[in-house]
Amino acid sequence: MKNVCYPFVLLWTAMAPAFLFAKEWHVGPSRAYTTPAQVSNLVSDGDTVSIDAALYPNHPQVYLTRNRLLLRGIGGRPRLEAGAALAGNANGKAIFVISGADCAVENLEFANAAVPDHNGAGIRQEGCDLTVRYCFFNGNEMGILGGAYTDCTVTMEYNEFANNGSTSNPGYQHNIYIGRIDTFIFRYNYSVNAIAEGHELKSRAKNNIILYNYTGNQTTTDSRTIDLPNGGTAILVGNVIEQGTSSANSNLFGYGMEGLSNPAPHNMWVAHNTFVNKKSTGNFIQAGAGTDTLFLKNNILAGAKTSGLIQGTPAHLDSSHNVVNNSINAVGFEDPANFNYHLTGGSPAVNRGIRLDKYVGSYSLDPEWEYANTAMNTPRALSGPPDAGAFEYPQSSAAQEPGNSALSVFPNPCRDILHTSGTDQAMYSIHDTGGRYIQGGLTLRNSIRTTDMAPGVYFLRIGNKSCVFVRE
């Protein structure tokens, strides 16, 4: 009997999933490891680094070379604040330099990264297939700086970016910069106020999937709001794209302006976005020479267009059912002075759109979601003809306070594990009563670990369902 079982155990061990051997490393001011740098050379493939909510001042550069790492904040959002340790590093790149593949970063703040060549980033991506969610990039020279890696996908969702750029090198640093990768997915993010003529979003990816975000300049001197300089496939659905009065550029969305060096076809699919130009000059979309297709339907384009609605001449222009007006106030926004572009009942955008019934790859051009403050999303309820722009009138009930659509959880109160009914593999987020993000990720077999959460009352959200629970 032993001769039969022993080889079986060896075979099972060799084939066992890597997560069975993964380790969780805890970092915090009161832990054995007080900074992420202290565990960076200790982690193995598949490990988790859990960082307690605290301020980590003068944070050095940390190289992360292992694959399938999860780097996350717990108990709130830790702030990794760069200082002299990074600024004085002759080979400095970023607070986190991630060269491992298939890594994820969740619920961390990256601040004040600066290095001698002025490209100091919160995160420098040097490995493939990176996911960043629920993070905040504030006051760095680059929020996220991505490299050029073939067959790589970078996904960013539920993040905030603000005031990134460099006054020492104006025009070359941005809130987000993505290099020549295959696919960039950018959804449910809030990117504002790039400084020193930087962009809120710049990507050289072959495929750019930009869905349900707020990208805009409100108070600083930026350049284009979105810049896709090398063409390829661009899908923009459900975004608010705003240009402020101090922008150094004159168009909101630039495509192919540095040459269409990505593989053809060079197509833009632009549906149900709200473009707002608060300058007295400019245009909304600038297409580089050689652009194949601009599909432009069910959008709002509000504000000045002194150089035309579109600059450039795509070979194929398919445009209809857009609301275009030189006057922002005439479009019927709720409060444009305070950046609220939901529609009032009298807006000419109400019922202006048409059902598109069109997919580009697996992405629908009919909106399924709406952007929700801040760096969140909510289902878009459609009945009858859709409204033009990023929002449906009236707002979906799901955009109101949590608890409108019941979610069943147990035990409640809970201690270590919270079980949900009927969600299995689904994205969740937990917030405190003040709306602050605490943790999120994928539910695992209808369960969520709450071990690292402090006792208190919390909101749980999964899709368009939410509930209140108590952690004992």
Image: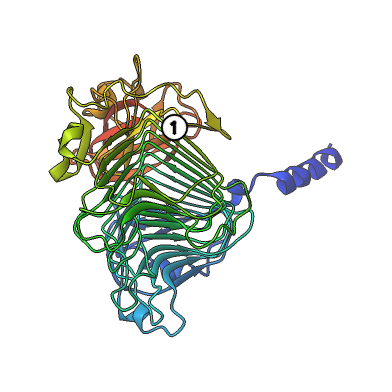
Q: Where is residue 104 in the image (x, y as percent from the top left)?
A: 48, 52
Residue lying at 43% horizontally and 78% vertically, measured from the top left:
92
What kind of colouring is applied to the model shown? rainbow
Q: Is residue 58 above or below residue 301?
A: below
Q: Where is residue 32 in the image (x, y as percent from the top left)?
A: 38, 66
Residue lying at 45% horizontally and 21% vertically, measured from the top left:
422
Q: Where is residue 350 in the image (x, y as percent from the top left)?
A: 26, 23
Quadrant of res 431? top left
* Depth order, front residue of 393/460: 393
* Depth order, front residue of 208/185: 208
Quadrant of res 29? bottom left
- Considering the image in quadrants, where does the N terminus appear? top right
Residue lying at 61% horizontally and 46% vertically, measured from the top left:
265
Q: Where is residue 240 in the image (x, y as percent from the top left)?
A: 31, 42
- Considering the image in quadrants, where does the C terminus appear? top left
**Numbered disc total:** 1
Res. 369 visible in picture: yes
* Depth order, front residue of 250/213: 250
Q: Say left or right for 31 vs 22.
A: left
Q: In this view, does 141 lie above or below 105?
A: below
User: Which SS class for mark 1?
Assistant: strand
Q: What residue type is labelled 1?
A: Ser
- Residue on which disc 1 sits: 447
